[in-house]
Image: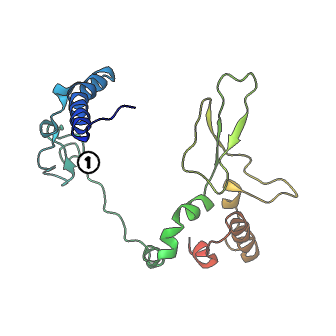
Amino acid sequence: MLHYNPADLRLRRDTEAARQRRHGSDTLLIGLGYLTEYNHPERHRLSSQLNCAHCNAPKLPGEAPTVCCNSGQVVLPLFDRLPVELQRLFNNPQFLKDIRQYNKAFAFTSMGASTRANDPIRQDETVAGGGIYNYRIQGALCHRIGSLTHLPMHAPSFTQLYFYDSIDVEQYNAVLNTRMSFYAGLDRSIMATL
């Protein structure tokens, strides 16, 4: 059985670690296509922000003066203030927590995609109501719009929910109930406000 001096082991470990630091990391980085001579972040810092003299839009150094407002030739009107009801919603933590769900409840279309490329028969999949924020697409991407009117014995969905007589309270409540059934857990009063 071999016995090593702990000091010798420590020296060997330190020497090997130093060798790997000197040679191994650069060799690996070069092998991965990383060029150490380009590692100068101070060269890539943006200078202080510039603003357009006409519209006060933030601009990067070197951008043409026509990028934002065409040197003052394009003047857009200011946005109207949000209605008070919507201002209140943006101060409501429950609304902000579920804002993606409220946005989906008012979607005009559903999202679909072919998740396998080169299939002889296209097999589309839709993003489920619970929803993940991204998924792999290897074929075609599509929006399913569907018919503008719903089929008999089927509940309206997506764009069909926007076609109703606003005077008819019963129809309005039916549309609101349909939206509420698609997305459980949303506040009915917030849905009515939106």
Q: Is residue 118 above or below residue 57?
A: above
**Foreground pick, 111 / 145:** 111
Residue extending farthest right = 153
Q: Amino acid at mark 1?
A: Val
Q: How many marks?
A: 1
Q: Quadrant of the N terminus?
A: top left
Q: What residue is shown with label 1?
A: 74
**Foreground pick, 71 / 98:** 98
Residue 98 placement, left or right of 40: right
Instruction: Return the x and y of residue 52 as percentages of the image width and height.
Output: 16, 49
Q: Is residue 18 above or below residue 53?
A: above
Helix, strand or loop at mark 1: loop
**Quadrant position of residue 3:** top left
Residue 3 placement, left or right of 48: right
Colour setup of the view: rainbow
Instruction: Return the x and y of residue 139 as percentages of the image width and height.
Output: 62, 29
The residue shown at (74%, 47%) is: 147
Instruction: Return the x and y of residue 168 as percentages of the image width and height.
Output: 73, 74
**Quadrant position of residue 171:** bottom right
How dense is the environment of label 1, judged by Cα within 10 Å: few (below 14), some, or many (20 and up)? few
The residue shown at (15%, 34%) is: 40
Q: Quadrant of the C terminus?
A: bottom right
Residue 174 placement, left or right of 49: right
